[in-house]
Amino acid sequence: MTPNMAASYCETPVAVGTVHWKKIPHGHRHTTGRPLIHGRDAPVADGPEGRADTLHDRVLAHTGGLPNDGLLACLLSAWVGGRSVLPVHMGLSGSEYRQLLGRHFPGLMLNPPALEPVEVQRMDERRELRELLLSHRRGQDPSEVWLAGIVAAACMGPDHLWQDLGLQSRDQLSWLMRDNFPGLVELNDRDMKWKKFLYRQLCLAEGILICRSPSCEVCQDHAVCFGPEV
């Protein structure tokens, strides 16, 4: 990554309009029908109280107790349900996506979302974010590699990282980072917003001064980096 490119990432880490497809506003779901899911143990009827099983519950029914099963079920159901900015295959290669499904959700077949045909740019940026995450992975499960690709792809979105991933709260993102990329959690000991923090790490690796204030405490933009994510 060239210094000019790194500086542009730090100044404007998410370009306006650079999204892979239109996501439903946070907190909303599709109302035009549920994506089809088939396979082992897939619920096909309403629950005992007359409530239809959610997409997340249907995906979760195929897990086998592996690390990150629940987290990946949340990410997958959000992607299929239109609540994330993740592109085709959740930002993974076709092979990686199939491996993820086969390992964590055996027997599950679903219809992926119809993504808008937009030009995908900033691939070098995604690659460097993925490499940053992988350099701080826990190293205990293959799913950490897939999560690094998913998180890097979500960083291309316009909102907070947890929203672009389709998660319900920043707490879920913090759980993802603690369980899979603990080295980054240790570095982010002041709880900077995760997307800001990841881009800051890229810029620091290039030796680029990205803040003019002598410390975060006296910076006029403190809330931009450390404020609540709502």
Image (spheres, rainbow, N blue to C red):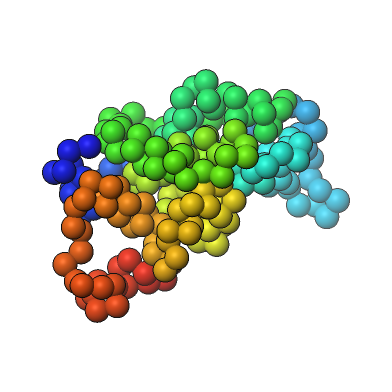
- State whether residue 15 is above or below residue 175: above
**Going 56% across and 44% down the picture, which residue do you hit?**
138
- Looking at the picture, how far across and down is residue 208, in whole percent? 19, 52
Quarter of the picture holding the N terminus = top left
Q: Which residue is rendered at x = 56% and y = 55% of the image?
A: 178
Percent x, y for residue 40?
Answer: 78, 28
Q: Is residue 217 left or right of residue 77?
A: left
Using the image as rendered, state which of residue 122 and residue 187 is in the foreground.
Answer: 187
Against 92, residue 56 (above or below) is below
Front in this rendered view, residue 176 or 189: 189
Hey, which residue is sitting farthest top in the picture?
Answer: 95
* Picture coordinates of residue 131, whole percent (x, y): 39, 37
Q: Position of residue 202 (x, y in %)?
A: 30, 47
Task: Look at the image and tell me in which quarter the C terminus lies.
Answer: bottom left
Query: Which residue: 17% across, 38% down?
Result: 2
Residue farthest to the right, as pictured: 48
